[in-house]
Structures are given as structure tokens and as C-alpha cells.
Image (cartoon, rainbow, N blue to C red):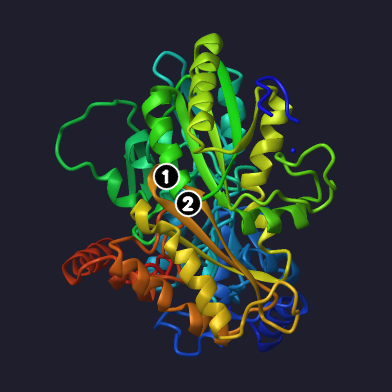
Amino acid sequence: MFALASISRLGRASASARARASAALSIRGFALTAEKYPSVKRGDYAKLTDEDLGKFHSILNPNQIITDAADLAAFNQDWMKKYAGQSQLVLKPKTTQQVSQILKYCNERKLAVVPQGGNTGLVGGSVPVFDEIVISMASMNQIRSFDENSGTLKVDAGVILENADNYLAERGYIFPLDLGAKGSCFVGGNVATNAGGLRLLRFGSLHGSVLGLEVVLADGTIVDSMHSLRKDNTGFDLKQLFIGSEGTLGIITGVSILCPARPKAVNIAFLGLESYEHVIQCFKEARSDLGEILSAFEFMDRDSQLVASKFLKTTHPLCQEDEVAEASVPEYPFYVLLETSGSNKDHDDEKLEKFLEKVMENEVVVDGTVSQDEAQLKTLWTWREGIAEASQQFGGVYKYDVSLPLDSLYKLVEETQERLKSFSLASTEDESKPVYEAIGYGHIGDGNLHLNVAVREYNKEVEKALEPFVYEFIEKHNGSISAEHGLGFQKKNYIGYSKSEVEIKMMKELKNHYDPNGILNPYKYI
């Protein structure tokens, strides 16, 4: 059924103000993080006063300061509907100098702050735990410059990823990062979390793509290293400290990044396979036969496709024409979305066709469809990118973003499913069970598994069944507890499963050096 051109699928606040903020959260059904995790205690930070508010008004315009409880709610809640703080103040600086003035004052007063980008994070890293001041980068949203000769883009940290990519598209270039949250996430947040995404297989991680950064330290010092040089061997590469530091060492205000030329030809193949072993074999064959044009290799189990189908309510790409359209997913246990991108359409088409003929003939792949039309490309990607949002539809989701060797990667999903059922916690049919299903999907090309446990409600029994079980499995199989989402609040206590005591000690020493008062994103990371 292959058809190369078509598819056949948020003065000291008064008690009343605090109550209003808390009530605003409760109305929306959010339990405060501090209440859900009573063992976490507020640090020895100053409390916000009227004098503090006056100082911030001397730095920012009134429209850059948010104190209204209703308006604060969105900044206090995470996208996962799992974490919620009680910040009484959101500051929205427009310049790096304003960020510097704010941090200098907060550091002197010992006022805790949380840097926040698009707030699309999945580990509770971008929202307050208690009453930290939120510093939103939303107003720092300008593209500073683009060099069409070198492909170097310089942007404010608050530029939305999709906007940056669209800007580049008009100039024949592409942003070296693509995420399902690209319409909401900020470039600064992407760098602060070292986001991986869908283009890592082809373009590598942000540690390689980022050429320079502008960062404001806790004491207000501005570190301007917005270089555009690909080669600079003059001492320590300091920008690397901030890539993936999740706002705990400084606030990123500007990014200089190398962007590749935009591919002129893109193909997507959506494939059905009979086993996980066949997924791995297909990947090996794709790397060998497709080489430099292989830009994405995503795998999905059938359960993830069933969850997506209930949410998308459209025909699955591999459904036969005579099958029922709604919520119908073929019986293949695994699916692969493979993307090629290059500069010569005929050349790429030929390589892909030969590859597909080979894996079909060898029975590595049993079914599939291919598309080149842009609308059809987006449709196929929806069945991979839509899984994260679809997992939320039953009430919530426990998300585990991990790295594992390929031979043990899917075993984590299987053992998690078995464990939840052995505790009588999971059922797709019995709505009295807190867990709907555990599903697996991710980036085979870089060994990144997304284990999503879709739940009808967040439940302590479910958490006890999952943690530390998941992290113990990862440690046993020499993996990482975070592949691309970061540590945030959710994983900080489990870092020992992936880092040695010496490594953790070094990380803490860096934190104490750059942020001795601990005001930057407290209760997170380490």
C-alpha cells in the first residue's frame, strides 16, 4: 500500500491576597505542590513586601507587572496539571538590563525567583513551588539578527520556537530543533532544558548547535557571549554550563545558534511492524541504506496509537479503506515514523523506495504508507506528535522521559504495564482503576523512550508503584532518568540513579559558586 505521493491517515501580601491566589488554583482543580509534597519546606527566603513591589515598579512599566490572582494562575500552574505554586508576582522584563536589575535586587533581598519561558515543561521546573517571584521571558521576543551566509540566528530568549522556524523558512533555513510544543515553547527555555526533540538524529543536540549565549547571573552580572563563531578554542566553553541548567545558574536572555539549510525534499514513511526487534532491525537498515538523508526515526507501540486515536478521532494512516474510520488502529504491535530530508528529491525518493522494498521483502516491515505532500506530512506527524497531548485526555499522565540502550528500552514499558496490572491499578475498561494504560514511544535514533502512564486521576498508590521502580530499572540498565525534559521538581531527588556522588558534588559546587544565596529556581534540579 505504498504510494510515494499520497496517503491511503503568576509590602507583603495580605492573607486575603494569598487566599485569593490559592482559591484561584483550587477553582481550577489544582492541588498546591507544597500541599501534595509536605516534606518539601520553604527555604529561608525573604517574603514579598510593598517596598519590593515599589522597587520593581521603578524598573518596569505597570503592564510588565502582574499581581492579579486570576492573571497569576496560568504562571503558577504547569502544563501537566500536576504542579502549582502560590506566586503573588510575575515580572515581564523586556530587556536584558531589566533582568539584570531585577536579579541584582532579588539577590540582595534574598527573594527567590523562577525563570519561566513558555511553561511547556514536563517536570515542574518552570513553576513556583511556594511563593517565588516568576520572571517571565514572554516580552523578550525579538529576533536580533540573522546571517544568511553562515546561518547564524541571534534571538531573545522569549522567541517562540515555531516563530523562529517560520522566520528561517522564509530565508531557506531551518531551526535545528523541533518539538511538539513548538507553538508555545520559547527558545531560551529550550536551551535552558537542553531540549532534544525530533531533529536531534539529523542535527545533534543544542550543546553543538548553540554558538553563544547571553546570561544574567544571580547577582545581576550580564555574561555576554553571543558569539557567532563555530570555532573558538580560547579556554573554557562557559556557555555549556547554562545549556541544560534549567535556570539554576543564571537566566538566559539571548541565544546565538547555528541553523542548517532547509531541506528541499522531505519524505515520511509510516510503517507497521510485528515486534520491537523488527523496529531495531529497521533502524539499523535505515541508518545503513538512507545514511545522510535520515532525519527522524520515531517508534510507537500500538497502545500509544490507540490512545491517540481516541483523541484525534481520525482514520489511522494504516487503516484499510474498508475499515471503520473512528478509533480504529490496525493490529500491528509497533509503528515507525521515518523521515528523510535532503536537497535532491529524485535522489531521496530513489533511496527511500529501495530501502522500503528491502525491509518489506525481508519482512522487517509488514505494512506502510509514504507521503510527500506537506499536508499529508503533517497528518502523519500528528500520529506521533499528538500522543503527548492525547495521554492527558483521561485526567492526567505520569511522564518518564528516559534514555536506555536500545536492547532494553522497550522492556521498561512491558515491565511497567505488568507491574501496574499486578497492583490492580490499571484497566482500559474499568473506570474505577486510576490508571488507563502505560504506553511507550520515542526517538529510537538517540535511545530516548517516552513512557507515559495515562491516568484517570493522580494517585499516591500509582506513584508508589512507579517510583522508584522506573528509576531503579534505568540504573540497572545503565540509562539516564532524563533524556531531554530535564530534572525540574519531579526528578531532583532521583538524580543519584544517573549521576555519581562525585558528579553531584561538582554540580552543587557550581550552583553554590554562581548562586550562593540559592535564589534561582529553588527546590529544583539538585
Question: Image quadrant for the C terminus?
Answer: bottom left
Can you say whether 345 is above or below 133 in the image?
Answer: above
Q: Which residue carries the number 1 mark?
A: 280
Callout 1–callout 2 Cβ contact below 8 Å = yes
Q: Amino acid at mark 1?
A: Ile
Mark 1 lies on a secondary structure that is: helix
Question: Image quadrant for the N terminus?
Answer: top right
Locate residue 310, reporting x and y percent: 77, 57
Locate residue 412, reporting x and y percent: 44, 65
Between the C-alphas of marks 1 and 2, the distance is: 7 Å
Can you say whether 456 is above or below 62 in the image?
Answer: below
Residue 224 in view, yes or no: yes
Q: Is residue 17 left or right of residue 133?
A: right
Q: Is residue 489 left or right of residue 395?
A: left
Mark 2 lies on a secondary structure that is: helix
Q: Is residue 70 left or right of residue 455?
A: right
Name the residue rendered at 23%, 26% in the picture.
231
The one of 78 and 310 positioned closer to us in this rendering? 310
Asked where in the image residue 478 lies, by quadrant, the reply is bottom left
How many labels sit on residues? 2
User: Which numbered disc covers residue 23?
Assistant: none
The one of 319 and 150 positioned closer to us in this rendering? 319
User: Which numbered disc covers residue 276?
Assistant: 2
Name the residue rendered at 77%, 50% in the picture.
312
Name the residue rendered at 23%, 62% in the picture.
510
Locate residue 378, reporting x and y percent: 68, 34
Can you say whether 357 is above or below 81 in the image?
Answer: above
